[in-house]
């Protein structure tokens, strides 16, 4: 139902591109800096996508946080999104946007530190099942992956190469927003994922 990270560990001597290589799965915006086309076939259709510097507005989301082996991510995403939606309903709140997966640091085969859930505008409190997470405001880089999650690695390779070429420094945590996915669109070529790297 939700995107899947492949089993891929970090090689020795890796850079920014290698740091986010395992991420291949299922607000208001204003441009503040350089933008450019990403090189390479980063969509299923072979088109170039664009990365740009933006200014993030602060947002809050409610989700399930776990550190789990990569092999359990499929089960985790299904459970995390279902649990988050149920807790929002119990709290009398509603999602204010598409589902989000926030990654804390670099994933490996042994451990992926991730929080997955839904953004909210209502006042909500953490429960035993979910945490309240505040996404940062400020400068960031964003790009969009269009197509199957199986080709997500190409988008990550392109955007991290672009970030390095622009001499930008990422803050650490990053997230994906699943704007259009298999639950709403049966054609994988039309799936759309927003990828956000806050900058230090």
Image (cartoon, rainbow, N blue to C red):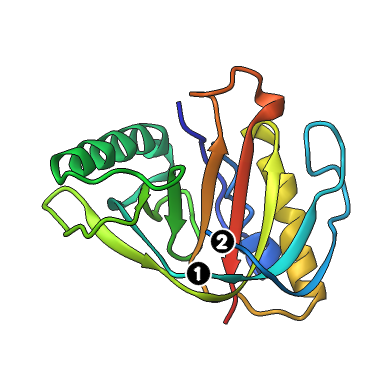
Residues 151 and 38: in front is 38
Residue drawn 45% across and 58% down? 103
At which x and y percent is residue 65? 29, 54
Residue occupying the point 58% across, 50% down: 22
Residue 120 image offset from top left, x and y in percent: 33, 53
The residue labelled by disc 2 is 28
Q: Is residue 129 left or right of residue 79?
A: left
The residue under the point 24% across, 38% down is: 83
Which residue has dot 1 on it? 57
Rendered-image quadrant of the N terminus: top left
77 or 137, nearer to the observer: 137
Q: Residue furthest top?
A: 186
Q: Earlier in the sequence, mark 2 or mark 1?
A: 2
Whole-angstrom CA distance, mark 2 to mark 1, is 7 Å
The answer to whether any part of residue 55 appears in the image is yes
Please, is residue 45 above or below residue 96 in the view? above
Q: Position of residue 58 (x, y in %)?
A: 44, 70
Which element carries disc 1, helix, strand or loop?
Answer: loop
Residue 128 lies, with reference to residue 160, above or below; the image says above
Numbered marks: total: 2
**The C terminus, quarter of image:** bottom right
Q: Are there few (<14), some (14-19), or many (20+) residues within 10 Å of tag 2?
A: few
């Amino acid at each position: 139902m939700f995107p899947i990270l492949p089993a891929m560990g970090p090689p020795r001597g890796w850079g920014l591109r290698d740091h986010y290589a395992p991420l291949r799965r299922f607000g208001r915006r204003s441009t503040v800096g350089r933008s450019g086309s990403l090189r390479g076939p980063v969509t299923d259709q072979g088109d170039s996508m664009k990365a740009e510097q933006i200014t993030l507005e602060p947002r809050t989301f409610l989700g399930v946080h776990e550190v789990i082996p990569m092999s359990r991510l499929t089960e985790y995403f299904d459970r995390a999104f279902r649990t988050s939606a149920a807790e929002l309903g119990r709290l009398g709140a509603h999602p204010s946007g598409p589902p989000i997966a926030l990654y804390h640091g670099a994933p490996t085969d042994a451990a992926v530190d991730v929080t997955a859930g839904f953004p909210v505008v209502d006042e909500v409190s953490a429960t035993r099942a979910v945490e309240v997470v505040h996404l940062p405001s400020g400068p960031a880089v964003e790009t969009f992956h269009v197509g199957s999650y199986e080709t997500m690695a190409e988008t990550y390779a392109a955007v991290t190469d672009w970030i390095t070429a622009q001499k930008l420094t990422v803050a650490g945590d990053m997230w994906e927003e699943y704007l259009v996915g298999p639950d709403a669109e049966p054609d994988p070529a039309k799936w759309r994922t927003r990828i956000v790297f806050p900058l230090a």
